[in-house]
């Protein structure tokens, strides 16, 4: 369970990889390496506790409910774990995948293979690149208006405005400062007061390491982009 710094990888803009010894590297270091399976076994109790807590939350809100349960899935690792847990909790739901026109081919392929239902942005916006050109918008981390048109609106407009819905989201507290304060129940203010909708965050307390160890342990399918070195692949919640 101890962390040893052995090597440092740097990747330049041309994707050239440079490997050099870490500054903390010591020739006398003797590291007994774990496999992922061994690490998962060492975290067994912790993972079981997280799993049971997530399933309990899902069952509390999702069993015997009069709400339509909407499972949002971007084909990212968090989404795949959350959907897996929803099945394990015995919920009856439909999984939706947002076609944002920004998705990598592997995500579209995975959504199709899993028979996810798709939502599309309003035709008046066109594709993302056509939209930003027409609106003269420069997208950035601080200017995330694309989320409203290509994800949030596309999802909400797929349902009757008076429908009582329960959304399953894969957001986690340690993803960002903005999400660190999220609780089990989350309501998007953009839904409007006329919406009778709530969202729950069954994996909000999980860390990146928890997610990956659980994936390895449960043999959950992952997006092929992760195998190419990408740390993120999904655009939806």
Image (spheres, rainbow, N blue to C red):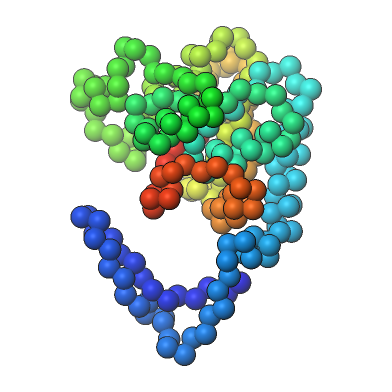
Is 211 placed left or right of 10 in the picture? Answer: right
Q: Could you tell me residue 230's position as x and y percent?
A: 39, 49
Rendered position, 75 above or below 64: below
Residue for point 71% across, 37% down: 88
Q: Could you tell me residue 50's position as x and y percent?
A: 70, 50
Residue positioned most to the bottom: 28
Q: Quadrant of residue 62?
A: top right
Residue for point 56% across, 39% down: 80
Residue for point 28% across, 63% down: 17
Is 132 placed left or right of 173 in the picture? Answer: left
Residue positioned most to the front: 113
Q: Could you tell me residue 104's position as x and y percent?
A: 36, 35
Residues 177 and 65: in front is 65
The quarter in which the N terminus is drawn is bottom right
Residues 74 and 116: in front is 116
Rendered position, 74 above or below 127: below
């Amino acid at each position: 369970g101890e962390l040893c710094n052995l090597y440092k990888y740097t990747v330049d803009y041309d994707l050239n990889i440079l490997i050099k010894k870490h500054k903390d590297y010591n020739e006398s270091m003797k590291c007994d390496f774990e496999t992922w399976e061994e690490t998962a076994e060492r975290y067994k109790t912790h993972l079981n506790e997280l799993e049971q807590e997530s399933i309990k939350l899902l069952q509390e809100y999702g069993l015997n409910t009069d709400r339509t349960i909407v499972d949002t899935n971007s084909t990212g690792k968090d989404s795949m774990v959350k959907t897996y847990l929803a099945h394990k909790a015995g919920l009856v739901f439909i999984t939706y995948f947002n076609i944002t026109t920004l998705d990598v081919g592997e995500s579209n392929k995975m959504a199709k293979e899993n028979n996810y239902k798709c939502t599309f942005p309003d035709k008046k916006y066109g594709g993302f690149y056509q939209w930003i050109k027409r609106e003269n918008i420069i997208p950035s981390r601080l200017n995330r208006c694309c989320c409203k048109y290509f994800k949030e609106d596309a999802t909400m407009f797929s349902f009757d405005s008076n429908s009582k819905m329960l959304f399953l989201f894969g957001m986690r507290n340690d993803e960002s400062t903005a999400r660190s304060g999220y609780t089990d129940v989350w309501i998007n203010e953009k839904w409007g007061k006329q919406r009778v909708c709530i969202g729950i965050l069954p994996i909000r307390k999980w860390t990146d390491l928890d997610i990956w160890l659980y994936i390895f342990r449960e043999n959950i399918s992952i997006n092929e982009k992760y195998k190419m070195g990408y740390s993120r692949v999904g655009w939806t919640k």
